[in-house]
Amino acid sequence: MILSTIPILIVGLALLIFGRKLFWLLVAAAGFVAGWYLSGHLFPGISEQTQVIVGVVLGLLGAGLAFVAQKVAIWLGGFVAGGYLLVSLLRGVVESVAFPDWIPFIIGGILGAILLKFLFEWGLIVLTSMVGAALIIDGIGFGESLHLPVLVILSLIGIVAQARLKRKKKQE
Protein backbone atom coordinates (compact mmCIF):
# COMPACT_ATOMS: atom_id res chain seq x y z
CA MET A 1 0.00 0.00 0.00
CA ILE A 2 3.00 2.35 0.14
CA LEU A 3 2.74 3.21 -3.56
CA SER A 4 -0.83 4.48 -3.30
CA THR A 5 -0.58 6.08 0.17
CA ILE A 6 1.21 9.30 -0.80
CA PRO A 7 -1.09 10.22 -3.74
CA ILE A 8 -4.16 9.37 -1.67
CA LEU A 9 -2.97 11.58 1.21
CA ILE A 10 -2.12 14.48 -1.12
CA VAL A 11 -5.45 14.32 -2.95
CA GLY A 12 -7.31 13.87 0.35
CA LEU A 13 -5.66 16.94 1.88
CA ALA A 14 -6.27 19.04 -1.25
CA LEU A 15 -9.94 18.04 -1.31
CA LEU A 16 -10.29 18.65 2.41
CA ILE A 17 -9.00 22.23 2.25
CA PHE A 18 -9.54 23.42 -1.36
CA GLY A 19 -12.25 21.10 -2.73
CA ARG A 20 -14.75 23.85 -3.56
CA LYS A 21 -12.19 25.71 -5.63
CA LEU A 22 -10.94 22.56 -7.32
CA PHE A 23 -14.12 20.87 -8.56
CA TRP A 24 -12.13 19.08 -11.24
CA LEU A 25 -10.02 17.51 -8.47
CA LEU A 26 -13.13 15.92 -6.96
CA VAL A 27 -13.98 14.34 -10.30
CA ALA A 28 -10.34 13.31 -10.82
CA ALA A 29 -10.19 11.85 -7.29
CA ALA A 30 -13.45 10.02 -7.90
CA GLY A 31 -12.00 8.56 -11.09
CA PHE A 32 -8.78 7.59 -9.33
CA VAL A 33 -10.57 5.93 -6.41
CA ALA A 34 -12.99 4.13 -8.74
CA GLY A 35 -10.19 2.85 -10.97
CA TRP A 36 -7.96 1.86 -8.08
CA TYR A 37 -10.75 0.16 -6.11
CA LEU A 38 -12.49 -1.55 -9.02
CA SER A 39 -9.32 -2.85 -10.65
CA GLY A 40 -8.35 -4.50 -7.36
CA HIS A 41 -11.78 -6.07 -6.91
CA LEU A 42 -12.49 -7.04 -10.50
CA PHE A 43 -9.04 -8.52 -11.04
CA PRO A 44 -7.88 -10.21 -7.82
CA GLY A 45 -4.13 -10.58 -7.67
CA ILE A 46 -3.47 -7.48 -9.78
CA SER A 47 -0.36 -5.63 -8.69
CA GLU A 48 -0.63 -2.45 -6.66
CA GLN A 49 1.34 -0.63 -9.35
CA THR A 50 -1.24 -1.60 -11.98
CA GLN A 51 -4.06 -0.52 -9.65
CA VAL A 52 -2.44 2.90 -9.25
CA ILE A 53 -1.94 3.22 -13.03
CA VAL A 54 -5.59 2.34 -13.71
CA GLY A 55 -6.61 4.84 -11.02
CA VAL A 56 -4.44 7.60 -12.50
CA VAL A 57 -5.80 6.99 -16.01
CA LEU A 58 -9.41 7.15 -14.82
CA GLY A 59 -8.54 10.18 -12.67
CA LEU A 60 -7.14 12.01 -15.70
CA LEU A 61 -10.24 11.09 -17.71
CA GLY A 62 -12.39 12.41 -14.86
CA ALA A 63 -10.46 15.70 -14.73
CA GLY A 64 -10.83 16.08 -18.49
CA LEU A 65 -14.53 15.38 -18.21
CA ALA A 66 -14.85 18.10 -15.55
CA PHE A 67 -13.46 20.66 -17.99
CA VAL A 68 -15.30 19.46 -21.12
CA ALA A 69 -18.71 18.42 -19.81
CA GLN A 70 -19.24 20.00 -16.42
CA LYS A 71 -22.89 18.94 -16.03
CA VAL A 72 -22.06 15.30 -16.66
CA ALA A 73 -19.03 15.60 -14.39
CA ILE A 74 -21.20 16.98 -11.57
CA TRP A 75 -23.48 13.95 -11.70
CA LEU A 76 -20.63 11.47 -12.13
CA GLY A 77 -18.33 13.06 -9.54
CA GLY A 78 -21.18 13.36 -7.04
CA PHE A 79 -22.17 9.74 -7.64
CA VAL A 80 -18.71 8.24 -7.18
CA ALA A 81 -17.83 10.55 -4.26
CA GLY A 82 -21.14 9.88 -2.50
CA GLY A 83 -20.80 6.14 -3.01
CA TYR A 84 -17.24 6.07 -1.71
CA LEU A 85 -18.22 8.23 1.24
CA LEU A 86 -21.17 6.06 2.33
CA VAL A 87 -19.07 2.89 2.09
CA SER A 88 -16.37 4.63 4.14
CA LEU A 89 -18.89 5.82 6.74
CA LEU A 90 -20.37 2.34 7.10
CA ARG A 91 -16.89 0.89 7.50
CA GLY A 92 -16.44 3.15 10.51
CA VAL A 93 -19.80 2.29 12.07
CA VAL A 94 -20.64 -1.29 11.14
CA GLU A 95 -18.02 -3.96 11.81
CA SER A 96 -19.51 -6.70 9.69
CA VAL A 97 -21.88 -5.78 6.92
CA ALA A 98 -24.33 -8.43 5.74
CA PHE A 99 -24.52 -7.00 2.22
CA PRO A 100 -21.93 -6.27 -0.46
CA ASP A 101 -20.23 -2.85 -0.76
CA TRP A 102 -21.95 -2.05 -4.04
CA ILE A 103 -25.37 -1.60 -2.37
CA PRO A 104 -24.37 1.31 -0.09
CA PHE A 105 -22.14 2.58 -2.92
CA ILE A 106 -25.15 2.95 -5.23
CA ILE A 107 -27.31 4.51 -2.49
CA GLY A 108 -24.54 6.94 -1.50
CA GLY A 109 -23.84 7.63 -5.16
CA ILE A 110 -27.42 8.67 -5.86
CA LEU A 111 -27.46 10.90 -2.77
CA GLY A 112 -24.09 12.45 -3.69
CA ALA A 113 -25.19 13.18 -7.27
CA ILE A 114 -28.43 14.78 -6.08
CA LEU A 115 -26.58 16.82 -3.44
CA LEU A 116 -24.15 18.24 -5.99
CA LYS A 117 -26.81 18.85 -8.62
CA PHE A 118 -29.20 20.82 -6.41
CA LEU A 119 -26.94 22.34 -3.74
CA PHE A 120 -23.79 22.71 -5.77
CA GLU A 121 -21.80 25.25 -3.74
CA TRP A 122 -22.45 23.91 -0.23
CA GLY A 123 -22.83 20.35 -1.48
CA LEU A 124 -19.37 20.62 -3.00
CA ILE A 125 -17.91 21.97 0.25
CA VAL A 126 -19.45 19.21 2.37
CA LEU A 127 -18.78 16.39 -0.10
CA THR A 128 -15.18 17.35 -0.83
CA SER A 129 -14.44 17.83 2.88
CA MET A 130 -15.86 14.44 3.75
CA VAL A 131 -14.27 12.61 0.81
CA GLY A 132 -10.94 14.30 1.55
CA ALA A 133 -11.21 13.19 5.17
CA ALA A 134 -12.10 9.63 4.12
CA LEU A 135 -9.13 9.51 1.73
CA ILE A 136 -6.78 10.71 4.48
CA ILE A 137 -8.15 8.08 6.86
CA ASP A 138 -7.80 5.35 4.22
CA GLY A 139 -4.28 6.52 3.40
CA ILE A 140 -3.14 6.52 7.01
CA GLY A 141 -5.12 3.41 7.94
CA PHE A 142 -6.85 4.34 11.19
CA GLY A 143 -8.40 1.48 13.12
CA GLU A 144 -12.14 0.92 13.03
CA SER A 145 -12.66 2.43 16.47
CA LEU A 146 -11.13 5.76 15.38
CA HIS A 147 -12.52 5.80 11.84
CA LEU A 148 -15.77 7.67 12.48
CA PRO A 149 -14.53 10.20 15.07
CA VAL A 150 -11.52 11.12 12.92
CA LEU A 151 -13.74 11.34 9.82
CA VAL A 152 -16.10 13.73 11.60
CA ILE A 153 -13.28 15.91 13.00
CA LEU A 154 -11.40 16.13 9.69
CA SER A 155 -14.65 16.80 7.79
CA LEU A 156 -15.54 19.67 10.12
CA ILE A 157 -12.04 21.12 9.72
CA GLY A 158 -12.44 20.96 5.95
CA ILE A 159 -15.92 22.50 5.97
CA VAL A 160 -14.78 25.38 8.17
CA ALA A 161 -11.63 25.96 6.07
CA GLN A 162 -13.55 25.97 2.80
CA ALA A 163 -16.32 28.17 4.21
CA ARG A 164 -13.69 30.70 5.33
CA LEU A 165 -12.09 30.66 1.88
CA LYS A 166 -15.55 31.19 0.36
CA ARG A 167 -16.24 34.10 2.71
CA LYS A 168 -12.86 35.71 1.92
CA LYS A 169 -13.60 35.50 -1.79
CA LYS A 170 -16.98 37.23 -1.32
CA GLN A 171 -15.34 40.05 0.68
CA GLU A 172 -12.80 40.78 -2.05
Image (tube, rainbow, N blue to C red):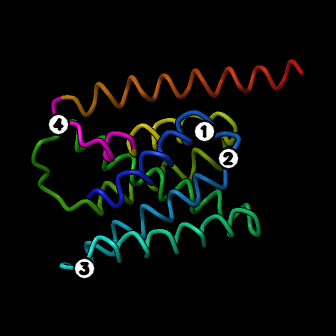
Residue marked by disc 3: 46
Q: For the C terminus, which image quadrant?
A: top right
Residue 22, disc: 2
Asked if labels 2 and 3 touch by Cβ distance under 8 angstroms, the answer is no
- Magenta segment: does it hold 68? no
- In the image, is 80 to the left or to the right of 124? left
- At x 25% / y 79%, what residue is drawn? 46
Of pointers 1 and 4, the one earlier in the residue sequence: 1
Residue at the right extreme of this rendering: 172
Instruction: Specify the segment rendered in magenta.
Output: 136-145
- Name which residue type carries label 4: Gly
Give the prevailing secondary structure in the magenta stretch. helix
Would you place residue 38 above or below residue 95 in this image? below
Between 88 and 57, which is closer to the camera in this rendering? 57
| Label 1 neighbour load within 10 Å: few <14, some 14-19, many 20+ | some
Between 161 and 6, which is closer to the camera in this rendering? 6
Q: Position of residue 32 (x, y in %)?
A: 47, 64
Q: Position of residue 82 (x, y in %)?
A: 46, 50
Residue marked by disc 1: 123
Would you place residue 79 above or below residue 134 in this image? below
Q: Position of residue 92 (x, y in %)?
A: 23, 38
- Name which residue type carries label 2: Leu
